[in-house]
Amino acid sequence: MRRMPLSADTAVKLADYMKVPLEHLMHMPQHILMQKLAEMAKAQTSETEKKSEIEGKTE
């Protein structure tokens, strides 16, 4: 099985999000990494939307 091609920055962010060491992240199955990447992206998107709503109300 090939390793998933992640950039170094993405790998560090994902390891921090999952609260696992970077070394463990690199040996995880690809389907788990894809699921966690999707969760992380969804969390960041909702966080960004909340911030933009708050900024829009203050103007």
Image (cartoon, rainbow, N blue to C red):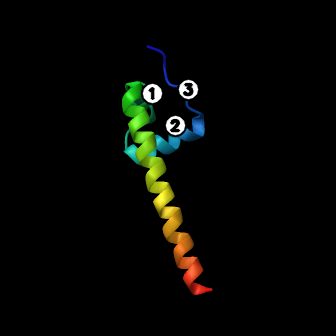
- Write the residue at 49% across / 56% down: 44
Please provide percent x and percent y for residue 56: 59, 79
Decide: marks 1, 2 in contact (CB < 8 A)?
yes
Q: What residue type is labelled 3?
A: Pro
Residue 22: give x, y in percent of width and height. Answer: 45, 34
Q: Which of marks 3 and 2 is nearer the N terminus?
A: 3
Measured in 3D between alpha carbons, the distance from the residue under mark 3 to the one under mark 2, in whole angstroms, is 9 Å
Residue 7 screen position, x and y as percent: 59, 34
Picture coordinates of residue 23, whole percent (x, y): 43, 29
Report the residue at 52% width, 65% height from top. Answer: 49
Describe residue 18's horizontal placement relative to residue 51 as left or right: left
- Residue at the location (51% across, 45% down)? 13
Tell which circle, 3 or 1, labels the residue nearer the N-terminal end: 3
Q: Is residue 49 above or below residue 9?
A: below
Where does label 2 land, which residue? 11
Could you say whether the residue bearing mark 2 is in a helix, strand or loop? helix
Query: As displayed, is residue 19 above or below residue 7?
Result: below
- List the residue tagged with mark 3: 5
Q: Tag 1's secondary structure? A: loop
Q: Which residue has dot 1 on it? A: 26
- The three-letter amino acid code for the residue at tag 1 is Met
Image side of residue 48 versus residue 30, left or right: right
Question: Residue at point 51% right, 41% down?
Answer: 12
